[in-house]
Amino acid sequence: MEISFRGKHALVTGAGKGIGRATALALARCGARVTAVTRTQADLDSLLQECASITPVCVDLSDWGATEAALQDVGPIDLLVNNAACANLQPFLEVTPDKFDQTFSVNVKAVLHVSQIVARGMKARGSGGSIVNVSSQASQCALRDHAVYCATKGALDMLTKVMALELGPHQIRVNSVNPTVVMTEMGRLGWSDPEKSKTMMSRIPLGRFAEVEDVVNSILFLLSDKSNMTNGVTLPVDGGFLAC
Ligand code: NDP
């Protein structure tokens, strides 16, 4: 299946590392003009060394005002990937208010905010568009020490559905991908312990974690016109974990 994003402008958040970085590079390879948003300048510098056509935006998405200012001049966006997130792992009884606020602020509030900015433009232009939120299997399955992370991803899935409902009439589709563990920096944080990773892997029918490319390919599909009638879905990229 050939996917081309020629003539499209894509914005990817959390594009400095992991899944977001690979998504930004894949979109550029498929012909899109790409704006990459993240908060560490060094990551943007190295991204531009890999792909000089990418436009960098350095901002901490948990800062509402700074995000508004940073995105005001990015121009019309056709494709949005809300990928940035943080995972602060704490046992439930030790969850602290600062980690709660920080995690919700990036994983949910920033998704709402960036999507508002982008979707207002899509609506005003009447151009339609496609938005993919990067959720997780953790939105639908309890994971030890992941109380706040799971709660943010559960909230994100419902945000995806309400956005699909309200933006659909403007031909803006909104879907999510819900991956299992991917061994990025974030993945290593939670699953480097061989005992933990063995237990998790044994619950995945395909018997392995996801590769970054597995997630990127599903994101590209949902962004593309190959999924034109798909709106409001939460697509597991989990080797069957959520099916069991
Ligand atoms: P990484 O930690 O590898 O990358 C996350 C990226 O988001 C980094 O570039 C990070 O920048 C950026 N980011 C985080 N917070 C902010 C912020 N406040 N403002 C701007 N940028 C920010 O994560 P992954 O690639 O693994 O995760 C990507 C998505 O996939 C996330 O939504 C995650 O929840 C989801 N996911 C990941 C899984 C996994 O096992 N890895 C499994 C299921 C879902 P910096 O490094 O500078 O903080």
Image (cartoon, rainbow, N blue to C red):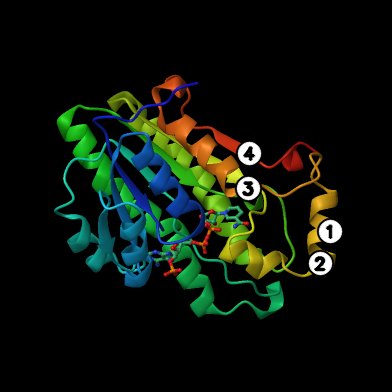
Please state, as top left, top right, bottom left or bottom right, where the C terminus lies in the image: top right
* Mark 1 residue's CB less than 8 Å from ligand 1: no
The residue lying at 46 percent from left, 71 percent from top is: 102
Quick check: marks 2 and 1 in contact, CB under 8 Å?
Answer: yes
Q: Which residue is identified by label 2? A: 194
State the CA–CA distance, disc 4 to disc 2.
Answer: 24 Å
**Image vertical order of residue 108 relative to residue 192, above or below:** above
Please state which of residues 124 and 31 is positioned toward the viewer in this rendering: 31
**Image quarter of residue 21:** bottom left
Observer-nearest of 82 and 101? 82
Q: Nearer the viewer, mark 4 or mark 2?
A: 2
Residue 144 or 17: which is nearer the viewer? 17
Amino acid carrying mark 1 in the image: Lys
| Disc 4/disc 3 C-alpha distance (Å) | 13 Å
Identified at 84% across, 59% down, the residue is: 198
Q: Amino acid at mark 2?
A: Pro
Relative vertical location of residue 84 with respect to residue 163 in this rendering, above or below: below
- Image location of residue 22, percent across then percent down: 46, 50
- Determine which quarter of the picture holds residue 144: bottom right
Element type where label 4 sits in the image: strand
N-terminal label among 1 and 4: 1
